[in-house]
Image (cartoon, grey):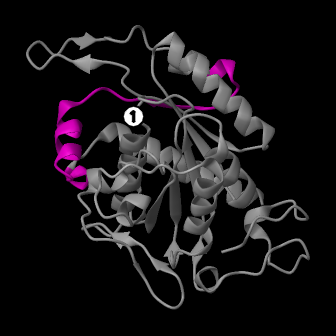
Amino acid sequence: MASSCSSCSSASSCSGSCPSVPELTEAQKISNVKNVIAIMSGKGGVGKSSVTGMLAVSLMRQGYKVGILDADVTGPSIPKIFGIKDKADANEIGIVPAVTPKGIKIISLNLMIPNEDDPVIWRGPIISQLVKQFWTDVIWEELDYLLIDLPPGTGDVPISVFQSIPVDGVVIVSSPQQLANMVVRKAIKMANMYEANFYGLVENMAYVECPDCHKRIEIFGKPRGEKEAEFNEIPFLGELPIDPKLAELSDAGNIEEYSSEYFDRIAQKLIARSKEKASKE
């Protein structure tokens, strides 16, 4: 696992020999994370954590080793939707992430505090430092994909992620409302400032299907994800419907039991884009 390097053209492939690269921690020395994907929106309430969780599940089902770094420190929900109750452990090398029943590795502040509903009343610099440690001090070992669930906004945490973690690609999550798209554009512009590689845009909550007549109901307005992706000059990964079954399983901590062809198709696109990026490098 390489640290971010300002002297190299590709941070993720840096050998660690450049003078500007910090010395690797013991946890980094025994870890090898091949692809780091940030799940970003800028807008809260668009289902970013659900998308992160289900993409991880889809990638895992396709045979890949997957981890999730929950960077939404003040509003973490990843442990809840995976039903993880045990706390993260630590040894002389570093922090040992929790593991879901299906084998997805997870680190989150909610795995370190006494109660899952305890508030985190910390200032930005402390939160940013914790997120950095989730990268440098966690024993991720071998991972094909590490998904980073970013919080809303363009503040301390996203800045810290782009500056200190070698992000290979960004997935933008939006929803049909014009208000959501306006805020999402802020996140896209921020990622552009860090020369991020966009894997694409996902439009969540695009519609709901009537359980009786199976009619498609666009409760948040006409989906505009494809046009929004085109406007921002990034690929369109697809749209996701609202599914009460996903909400039910997430509340019960059983998101790994949910299956969706929509998420599987998006995961396949992520795999293809990561392979394409690797071949170019």
Horizontal and vertical percent position of residue 28: 63, 79
Asked if residue 23 is positioned above or below residue 277 in the image, the reply reads below
In the rendered structure, the answer to whether residue 57 lies left or right of residue 7 reads left
> Which residue matches tag 1?
47
Q: Is residue 15 above or below residue 11?
A: below
Asked whether residue 55 is drawn in magenta, I would say no
Q: Determine the residue positioned at 27% across, 70% down.
A: 86
Q: Secondary structure at mark 1?
A: loop
Quadrant position of the C terminus in the picture: bottom right
- Magenta highlight range: 229-257
Residue at position x 52%, y 61% from top?
A: 146
Is residue 108 at least partly visible in the picture?
no
Q: Indicate whether 188 appears above or below 4.
A: above
In the orientation shown, which residue stands out farthest toward the left? 212
- Relative horizontal placement of residue 199, taking residue 245 as reference (left or right): right
Say few, some or many: other residues with alpha carbon within 10 Å of mark 1 (under 14 / 14 to 19 / 20 or more).
Answer: some
Q: Kindly indicate the quadrant of the structure image that contains residue 100.
A: bottom left
Q: Amino acid at mark 1?
A: Gly
Residue 7 in view (yes/no): yes
Q: Is residue 97 left or right of residue 36?
A: left
Please report the residue visible at 71 percent of the width from the left and 73 percent of the height from the top: 2
The quadrant in which residue 158 appears is top right
Q: Residue at x 59, y 76 (%)?
A: 32
Give the number of callouts.
1
Q: Position of residue 164 (x, y in %)?
A: 72, 60
Q: Hey, which residue is sitting farthest bottom in the picture? A: 92
Which quarter of the rendering shows the N terminus? bottom right
